[in-house]
Amino acid sequence: MQYKQRRRFSAEFKRWAVEQSLASHETLSAVAARLGVNVQVLSRWRRELTKSSDEDSAPVENQGPDKSYQQLERENARLKKQLERAELERDILKKADEYFTENPE
């Protein structure tokens, strides 16, 4: 059985491919097919390069459209947790209000 020799890509090509995938409105698999690389490889390059650029960039609290996907996911999770807590507090206050209006002492 013959094995294909593993292809190696330069760091410049990887950066260019990641930029193409981020700038394009196509799906990741369409961009990967157009570039001739496996979609999982391109996904890994994106993850590695955006992660390293996040660590090199300024503070974690980046504002505006420059936020990375991971930062947006973290913020989304934080906001969901905050909303859940606010809803729980609201429900507790509603029940307390109902109790005290029914049983005035």
Image (cartoon, rainbow, N blue to C red):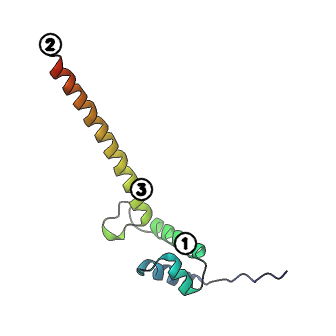
Of the numbered discs 2 and 3, the one sitting upstream in the chain is 3
Instruction: Point out the image quarter for the N terminus.
Output: bottom right
Disc 1 to disc 3, C-alpha distance:
19 Å
Q: Which mark is residue 43?
A: 1
Q: Circle 1: is it few (<14), some (14-19), or many (20+) Cα within 10 Å?
A: some
Q: Marks 2 and 1: CB-CB under 8 Å?
A: no
Q: Against 66, is 61 above or below?
A: above
Q: Marks 2 and 3: CB-CB under 8 Å?
A: no
Q: Nearer the viewer, residue 62 or 7?
A: 7
Disc 2 to disc 1, C-alpha distance:
64 Å
| Amino acid type at image mark 3 | Arg
- Which residue is at the far front? 102
Horizontal and vertical percent for residue 87?
29, 40
| Amino acid type at image mark 2 | Glu
Of the numbered discs 1 and 3, the one sitting upstream in the chain is 1
Mark 2, residue position: 105
- Which residue is at the far top? 105
| Amino acid type at image mark 1 | Ser
Name the front one of labels 1 and 3.
Answer: 1
Horizontal and vertical percent for residue 43?
55, 72
What SS does tag 3 mark? helix
What SS does tag 1 mark? helix
Q: Residue, x 57% and y 76% (percent of image)? A: 39
Of the numbered discs 2 and 1, the one sitting upstream in the chain is 1
Q: Circle 2: is it few (<14), some (14-19), or many (20+) Cα within 10 Å?
A: few
